[in-house]
Amino acid sequence: MFMRSCSQPSPLFSRAMARLSLRLAEARAWSLALAACLFSIGAQASASSGAERAGVAAVIQDYLDGSSYNRSDQLRRAFHADARLYLSGKDGAMREVGIAEYAAWFNDSPGQFNGRVGHLLNVQVDGDIASAKAEIVMGREPARFTDLFLLRRFEGQWKIISKTATRHAGPAHVKRVLVVLSNVSQMPGTTLGAGNSFVELVHTYSRLREAGYGVQFVSPEGGAVPLAYVDTRDVDQRAHVYDADFMWALAHSRKPEQVQASDYVALMYMGGSAAMFGVADNPAVRALALQIYEQQSGLLAAVCHGSAGLTELHLADGTPLVRGKRVTGYPDAFENKNAAYYKSFPFSIEQRLLERKAVFTQGPRNQPHVEVDGRLITGMSWESTRDVVAALLRQLDGRLNPSR
């Protein structure tokens, strides 16, 4: 009886199901339309917010360039005519100056670099007001300052209306290190997420900053990068999760085209699953690495899966950069070759490096293992990150202080 009633539904049941299907179709269409509308609004808001941040960043860049190259007109352009600057005076007293007086301090030798190196740390926009933070390193002293700005939009143009600064104790170098990240958030052909190793980022960034070096993040597409292996039980990682400047930098990585290789003394490839995708085969990233290493005699470093970035680097004569060099990276012996994540990898780091005639080495699992071969420094796994950075700093500091 049940089978017969199911195979031959009554007319009343059929009409009820038809009405229900129509209502469901209408509801689905309405929800899709609403989602599309919300997505459009969100995209427009995001684009608008991004445009405002870019406008603020451009103003701060006028300040940075104007003050670094004695371009008083460019410096004045960043400020409102009535802007006030609150600076350190004699014996710790506050000194208030106007923009005309401040800009006059940069009238000598127009266009000549004066030793100030600055870069943007953070931008926050709220309607027609904004705040920004920048770091200024004075290479001749050396000294490091944090500048804070308050901005307002007047007739569609952002202007600085106030600035103050503080000086930091400790080491300060005008030298900077470029850290390469990936934009890939999903392993191709799978539903698995991919990301840049957060713990490696924290160890690298914090140690370089403690040593007084500037750090800039770059990725093939620029902008926000995916993060993986975040463990807030770890004190250092938890501190950086709540570090606004650090997280802002990861959300606003630069494109290779926005970076001048001559500004950096070293380049380091970060690990994480994302490092296997979109980095090694990116010509702009490769060009940066080769210019720093080959043309500027800078240093290259990589850790864990970040060593994938080294596999496609060829010197001017066509020789693989790693040829004949001792290198390491995450070895095949530690990979699960039957897993979906591994099958999505475009190549094996170990095998590709061996194909390039590198001397590949590895150490015990879960232990640091680092190879230093001239200006090339590599680490096997995330546990090696601190030692890789330490080796990088030893060479960099040796160049700055050759007598040591």
Image (cartoon, grey):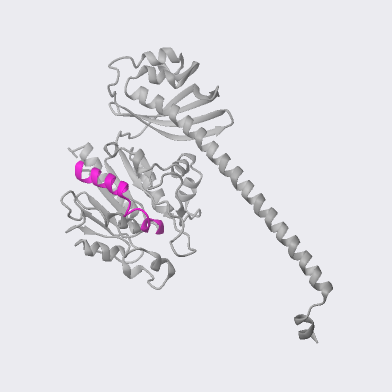
Residue 279 located left or right of residue 85? left
Image coordinates for residue 281, horizontal then vertical, percent? 32, 54
Task: Assess whether residue 280 is covered by the magenta stretch.
Answer: yes
Which corner quadrant of the image does residue 291 belong to?
Answer: top left
Q: Main secondary structure of the magenta part?
A: helix
Indicate whether 200 appears above or below 19. Answer: above
Residue at left offset 44%, top offset 22% = 78
Quarter holding the C terminus?
A: top left
Q: Nearer the viewer, residue 195 or 393?
A: 195
Quarter holding the N terminus?
A: bottom right
Q: Nearer the viewer, residue 345 or 88?
A: 345
Q: Is residue 275 in sight in this rendering?
A: yes
Residue at left offset 37%, top offset 54% = 278
Q: Is residue 92 in sight in this rendering?
A: no
Q: Nearer the viewer, residue 146 or 289?
A: 289
Task: Assess whether residue 221 is covered by the magenta stretch.
Answer: no
Image coordinates for residue 35, horizontal then vertical, percent? 64, 51
What segment carries the magenta color? 273-295
Indicate whether 17 appears above or below 93. Answer: below
Image coordinates for residue 298, horizontal then vertical, percent? 23, 43
Residue at left offset 55%, top offset 22% = 155
